[in-house]
Image (cartoon, rainbow, N blue to C red):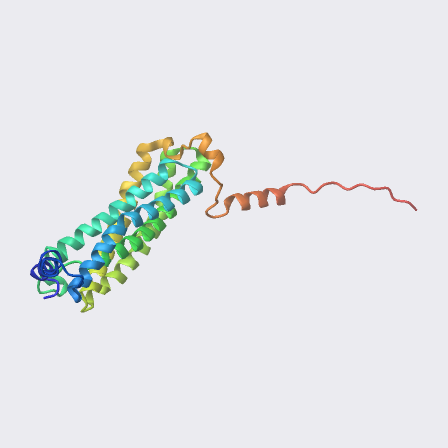
Amino acid sequence: EPWADETVSLVENLRDEVIPGALEGTKAQAYVGGQTAGYIDLANQIADKLPLMIFVVVALSFLVLLMAFRSLLVPIKAAAMNLISVAASYGVVTAVFQLGWGASLIGLPHSIPIVSFVPLLMFAILFGLSMDYEVFLLTQMREHYAENGDEKRAVIEGLANTGRVITSAASIMVCVFASFILSGDPVVKEFGVGLAVAIAIDSTLVRCLLVPAVMVLLGKKAWWMPRWLDRIVPHVSIEGEEYFAARDAAAAAPAPATGGASSD
């Protein structure tokens, strides 16, 4: 089969040993093509670029959260939590498809290799969805912290206000991704299992357990930001609360008095 270990070894042996030895001393060039060779080349390209892609995505999300929440530790914590969800999904996909744990339950007769581009696309999708839930939760926590100044109460009220919404939205996504398992294409099954498991873990264990626990442990330090950094980082309002506060204050301000003399 094209994805069998013996076929991969054959392609690598042809490229590394057989062809160079046969063409030694000549100007001829030979290439190995086919489905297996294409998968090997694609996997090598993705493996080379995947670390850079992960770094760019995490760095950009860090900068956006830094500007939005005016905190140094919150973006670091958010990136770490998102990576936990992604890593858990990678582990489940590897166990099911590569090791064959429960493969028969999703309609596969045996284990199959993971297609090289699946981890790349899964990371992009999962990081975006996880960050969406993270911003939704942290926005509520930040608003309550700004109102009462009690960091523990802010975590409790923020989770109470958003927990049901996050789990409800995540349940819909889990059902959608789980339906991919019904497809006869093994690649679609890999996406379905990985995305469904990741969203389920992210919306329960990560967002409703780990994130609040870490925020409570950090306390007021969670919203700390160095003064020199606060001066140079642009101010970004997620929901426009600063604009609306300024507008309401201007509307509530008394109108300037106008005076004048009248004549008969």
100 or 15: which is nearer to us? 15
Q: Can you name the residue that lies furthest to the right here?
A: 264
Residue 108 % position (x, y) = 12, 64
Q: Can you name the residue that lies furthest to the bottom here?
A: 184
154 or 127: which is nearer to us? 127
Identify the image quadrant of the N terminus.
bottom left
Residue visible at 42% across and 33% down? 225
Residue 33 % position (x, y) = 17, 66
Q: Is residue 13 left or right of residue 260?
A: left
Residue 169 % position (x, y) = 33, 56
Residue visible at 33% across and 39% down? 76
Q: Is residue 161 visible?
A: no
Q: Is residue 35 above or below residue 147?
A: below
Residue 87 % position (x, y) = 22, 48
247 or 262: which is nearer to us? 247
Q: Quadrant of residue 21?
A: bottom left
Q: Is residue 232 left or right of residue 122?
A: right
Q: Is residue 236 above or below residue 223?
A: below
Q: Is residue 239 above or below residue 30?
A: above
Q: Is residue 60 visible?
A: yes
Q: Is residue 81 above or below residue 219?
A: below
Q: Quadrant of residue 7?
A: bottom left
Give the tally of numbered discs. 0
